[in-house]
Amino acid sequence: DEKKRTAFRKDNIGFIFQHYHLMPTLTVYENVALGYRLNPGSMGCEAMLEAVGLAHHRDKFPHQLSGGEQQRVAIARALVKEPKVLLCDEPTGALDETTGKAILALLSDLNQRFKTTLILITHHRGIAKISDRIVTLNSGTIQSDVLNPTKLDASQIVWS
């Protein structure tokens, strides 16, 4: 039923949206705390903000941040609850190379440390190379579904 589906999503699934969906009247810390309140993880809000490089912006509001910083708040909000499945819609789309690689490394670490399943949607073929499995779609149709024999570390991605 709907109540069970809602509880399952709350407890098991995290979302990183391409367009952030931050609460404009909440601070950076409060936006991340929303995710933590849904399903408290072991890391906590302060540590997560530190991990995404935003601890010094904890008291700012979304309109006071750049697009890349807003994206990192959205990523922290999703990660802080340590979901079993994390759906990521272009999580590095608004980020520069250095920050993008750091976020991908953080996502990879979460995958390894907490055994979180990441479903990463990207148009960047280089980013796809950090995955264990690559499913390529075209207009909603699966074009290929392959195990990646040459998985890269985030630092090895060619960013162009």
Image (cartoon, grey):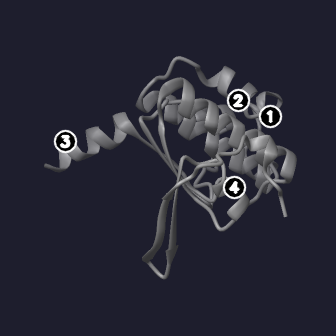
- Nearer the observer: mark 4 or 3; the answer is 4
In the displayed structure, would residue 43 be above or below residue 122? above
Residue at 67% from the left image edge and 42% from the top image edge = 73
- Nearer the observer: mark 3 or 1; the answer is 3
Q: Residues within 10 Å of mark 3 (few under 14, many from 20)?
A: few
Label located before the other in sequence (4 or 3)? 3
* Quadrant position of the C terminus in the picture: bottom right
In the displayed structure, would residue 76 be above or below residue 22? above
- Tell whether label 1 touches label 3 (CB within 8 Å): no
**Residue 103 position by quadrant:** top right
Name the spot of residue 84 as percent of width and height, x first.
Answer: 41, 35
Residue 129 vs residue 94, the one in the foreground: 129
Alpha-carbon span between mark 3 and mark 1: 36 Å
Label located before the other in sequence (1 or 4)? 1
Name the spot of residue 61 as percent of width and height, x first.
Answer: 73, 43
For badge 4, the amino acid type reads Ile
For badge 1, the amino acid type reads His
Alpha-carbon span between mark 4 and mark 2: 23 Å
- Tell whether label 3 touches label 4 (CB within 8 Å): no
- Nearer the observer: mark 2 or 1; the answer is 2
Alpha-carbon span between mark 2 and mark 3: 31 Å
Label located before the other in sequence (3 or 1)? 3
- Residue where numbered disc 3 is placed: 4
For badge 2, the amino acid type reads Leu
- Residue where numbered disc 2 is placed: 49
Q: Residues within 10 Å of mark 2 (few under 14, many from 20)?
A: many
> The residue tagged with tag 2: helix, strand or loop?
helix
- Residue where numbered disc 1 is placed: 57
- Tell whether label 1 touches label 2 (CB within 8 Å): yes
Which residue appears farthest toward the left when viewing the image? 1
